[in-house]
Amino acid sequence: MTIKKVIDFCLHFLLPNVCVICGKDTDDVYACVCRDCLTGIERIEGLSCAICSQPLPDGGAHCWQCKKASFHFEKIVAVGKYSGILRDLILKFKEMDCLKYSLGDLLLEIVEKNIGVQGFDLLVAVPLSKKREFSRGYNQSNLMAEVIGKKLNKPVVKNNLIRIRDTKPQFKLSRNERILNLKDAFRIKSPEAFKKKNIVIVDDVTTTCTTFEECARQLKNSGAGKIYCAALARD
């Protein structure tokens, strides 16, 4: 048994992790969610939009929005719908950074399956405002990007794509209001870091794809190659 395994065993014996959803022991010193609850997440499976991953129960290749819109990103991949266990986990993630391991692994699985390890060069998280990140203590999207980057040996570029002004909460706004709300809210400090690079942008939830699109636009203007977007949930 390695030293790490001995330490993990002792930590789990003294401070067992319990699931933030059901309260059961997770059997993993680094996990805050049990396997049963992770299995209970409603995944996006079957027919969905080839661009934004919106489920399409009636079939078709694209949702109505993507049929008439053009984007600076190639596509969005997502784990599941913003409901049930996944929604609860995302809300708890804003206060419990230990969820980065379980949720990062969920997103990693989707990135590997739908984008591929060879499909991109680096990762970047959707930035929070300085005020929000300071009050929370971390950017949850950046934590997930770090988990993915470490396991795939891909760099995570931090503090280069930045949010230069506070914006209103997106969930309160219509699609057109969201577009205006985020217009020119982001900036690239050093474009050279993204030049000719294929990039995965990481976020927790996407609803109208507006945040991903504005970040992708900034990256494309900096000379980036293909842009992919990865979200835990599609609302």
Image (spheres, grey):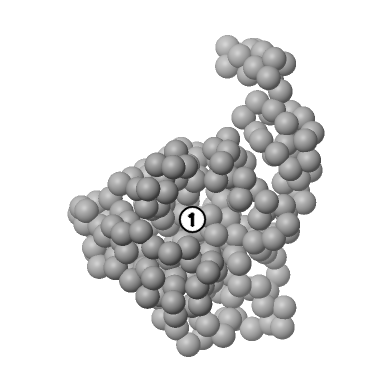
Residue 225 in sight from this viewpoint: no
Q: Quadrant of the N terminus?
A: top right
- Residue position for label 1: 203
Q: Position of residue 96 (x, y in %)?
A: 58, 38
User: Which residue occupies the foreground of this view, 210 or 182?
Assistant: 182
User: Which residue occupies the foreground of this view, 144 or 109?
Assistant: 144
Q: Which amino acid type corresponds to the residue marked 1 in the rendered image?
A: Asp
Q: Is residue 134 above or below residue 199?
A: above
Q: Is residue 167 above or below residue 25?
A: below
Q: Position of residue 61 (x, y in %)?
A: 60, 81
Q: Residue furthest bottom?
A: 68
User: Which residue occupies the foreground of this view, 66 or 207?
Assistant: 207
Q: Position of residue 186 (x, y in %)?
A: 31, 61
Examine the image and state in which quarter residue 205 appears.
Answer: bottom right
Q: Position of residue 232 (x, y in %)?
A: 58, 55
Residue 187 in sight from this viewpoint: yes
Q: Residue at x 37, y 44 (%)?
A: 156
Q: Residue at x 32, y 64 (%)?
A: 185
